[in-house]
């Protein structure tokens, strides 16, 4: 088998890239470890910048998103129950869109067969070979048989734990990492959201977040210890703690109901430099992780793919290699700014067990500054809607 681009991983990064390349007549095959059902059962991001919605529009796959998504023009902070509204559209002229990552993934997977985006599901032992030569190839096992795909370029879109980043020799890469001492316990429930905007709540007992997927589906989180487990959290305990942390003003609008999903996600900041080696190019979570505070993970995957697809298309069409050679540097410039915003918002809003009285006072002072200063609100707003490409 031979293709122009072998794409490892069928998350949003791999699917976006596959569709964008096919739109320009470039052949590609996506090789995914899981089944389609498994990929579609994962519940992750929900707040989209225009960099992400623009890709759906560019692909002509935005019909359902236009109908079912919700436009958000602001975000709400609850500071120990005190409401602070940041009117992001008034400040920036831009808005964000609430439409689940699961729905984006579904739209891209559903359209794959008619657009010639080939996806190999349930491929095990995926391995990358000769990535620093002109003829790299990928191997995997499926149904007891070994397969080999010869290719010109490889896109590593296989998330944090996939094999692509590991295929870059240690001497050629450097990782920067910060692991936080807490996680987010998230639940999804088929009840109406308690507020029309997303609420980020800073409370003495810890962070909480009220979000949504639709007018009838709520997504909420509370900060928990990193070694806590979902078994410790009945739905009743979750709702009680969530209501306490978002404060009485919002709590009175909370409709509780049985969770349809409940999980704990650890929080991490991570960047791998460089994002390319020879014929291999990393994109999305395979190269970087942000804590979910600020909703940047999926949107960063979309900006990586915007740069990478343009560079690959230019290389295949003109033979010019400058854009492809500059991919990592260009993508990292935007990634580091989103890393900073996610890290800043995480530090501002969470309770850190190791924080001294002084650091707690600094958090309080910064929150008071945010309440009172238009300039401080502007920096949140322009990052939240997404920095320019
Ligand atoms: P993905 O979505 O992780 O997709 C990678 C794909 O690669 C596959 N894979 C392999 N395929 C072949 N061989 C192997 N050996 C493989 N190993 C892995 C995986 O099965 C998967 O299908 O990365 P991608 O495409 O770069 O997209 C990035 C986004 O998914 C991610 O940034 C966000 O979802 C992060 N994230 C969140 N971001 C937000 O903006 N808001 C959120 O609320 C939010 N919640 C989350 C999240 C990520 C989570 N993870 C990674 C566990 C909640 C969770 C639980
Ligand atoms: C979500 O809706 O899942 C969500 C929203 C905002 C975030 C993180 C997650 O910052």
Image (cartoon, rainbow, N blue to C red):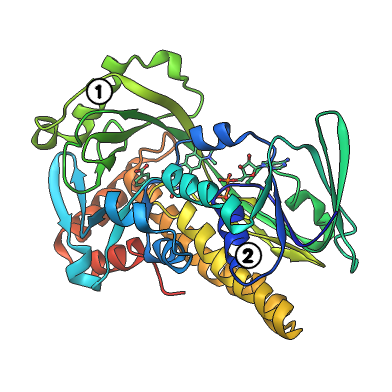
Q: What is the C-alpha distance between the residues marked 1 and 2?
A: 45 Å
Instruction: Give the number of marks.
Output: 2
| Residue under label 2 | 22
x and y percentages locating residue 332 in the rendered image: 59, 68
Report the disc number at residue 239.
Answer: 1
Answer whether residue 374 is visible to the viewer in this image: no
Which quarter is ligand 1 in?
top right
Which is more N-terminal, label 2 or label 1? 2
Q: Which mark is residue 21?
A: none
Secondary structure under tag 2 reads helix
Judge whether 232 appears above or below 334 on screen. above
x 37%, y 17%: residue: 233
Evaluate if marks 1 and 2 touch, with contact meaning CB atoms under 8 Å apart.
no
Does 297 sit above or below residue 25?
A: above
Q: In terms of depth relative to the viewer, which is nearer, 126 or 269?
A: 126
Tell whether 70 sits left or right of 274: left
Answer whether residue 333 is visible to the viewer in this image: yes
Residue at 46 percent of width and 49 percent of height: 107
Q: Secondary structure at mark 1?
A: helix
* Residue beneath the point at 27% across and 56% down: 366
Q: Is residue 288 left or right of residue 223?
A: right
Which residue reaches farthest front? 114
User: Is residue 188 left or right of 157 when viewed as pictured?
Assistant: left
């Amino acid at each position: 088998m031979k293709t122009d681009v072998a794409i490892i991983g069928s998350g949003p990064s791999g699917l976006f890239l596959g569709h964008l390349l096919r739109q320009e007549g470039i052949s590609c095959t996506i090789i995914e470890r899981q089944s389609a059902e498994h990929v579609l059962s994962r519940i992750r991001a929900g707040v989209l910048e225009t960099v992400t919605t623009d890709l759906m529009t560019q692909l002509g796959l935005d019909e359902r998103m236009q109908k079912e998504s919700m436009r958000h023009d602001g975000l709400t902070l609850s500071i120990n129950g005190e409401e602070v509204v940041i009117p992001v559209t008034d400040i920036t002229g831009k808005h964000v869109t609430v439409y689940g990552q699961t729905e984006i993934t579904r739209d891209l997977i559903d359209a794959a067969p008619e657009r010639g985006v080939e996806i190999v599901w349930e491929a095990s032992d995926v391995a990358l070979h000769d990535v620093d030569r002109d003829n790299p190839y990928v191997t995997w096992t499926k149904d007891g048989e070994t397969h080999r795909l010869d290719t010109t370029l490889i896109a590593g879109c296989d998330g944090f734990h996939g094999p692509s980043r590991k295929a870059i020799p240690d001497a050629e890469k450097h990782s920067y990492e910060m692991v936080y001492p807490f996680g987010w316990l998230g639940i999804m429930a088929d009840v109406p959201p308690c507020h029309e905007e997303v609420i980020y709540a800073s409370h003495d007992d810890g962070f909480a977040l009220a979000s949504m997927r639709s007018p009838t589906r709520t997504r909420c989180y509370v900060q928990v210890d990193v070694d806590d487990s979902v078994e410790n959290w009945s739905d009743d305990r979750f709702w009680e703690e969530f209501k306490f942390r978002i404060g009485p003003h919002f709590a009175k609008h909370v409709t509780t109901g049985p969770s349809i999903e409940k999980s704990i996600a650890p929080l991490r900041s991570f960047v791998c430099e460089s994002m390319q080696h020879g014929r291999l190019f990393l994109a999305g979570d395979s190269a970087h992780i942000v804590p979910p505070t600020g909703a940047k993970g999926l949107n960063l995957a979309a900006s990586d793919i915007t740069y990478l697809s343009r560079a690959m298309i230019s290389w295949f069409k003109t033979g010019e290699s400058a854009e492809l050679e500059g991919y990592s540097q260009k993508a990292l410039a935007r990634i580091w700014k989103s890393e900073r915003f996610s890290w800043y918002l995480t530090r501002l809003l969470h309770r850190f067990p190791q924080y001294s009285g002084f650091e707690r006072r600094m958090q309080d002072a910064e929150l008071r500054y945010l309440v009172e200063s238009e300039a401080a609100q502007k920096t949140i707003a322009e990052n939240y809607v997404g920095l320019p490409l």
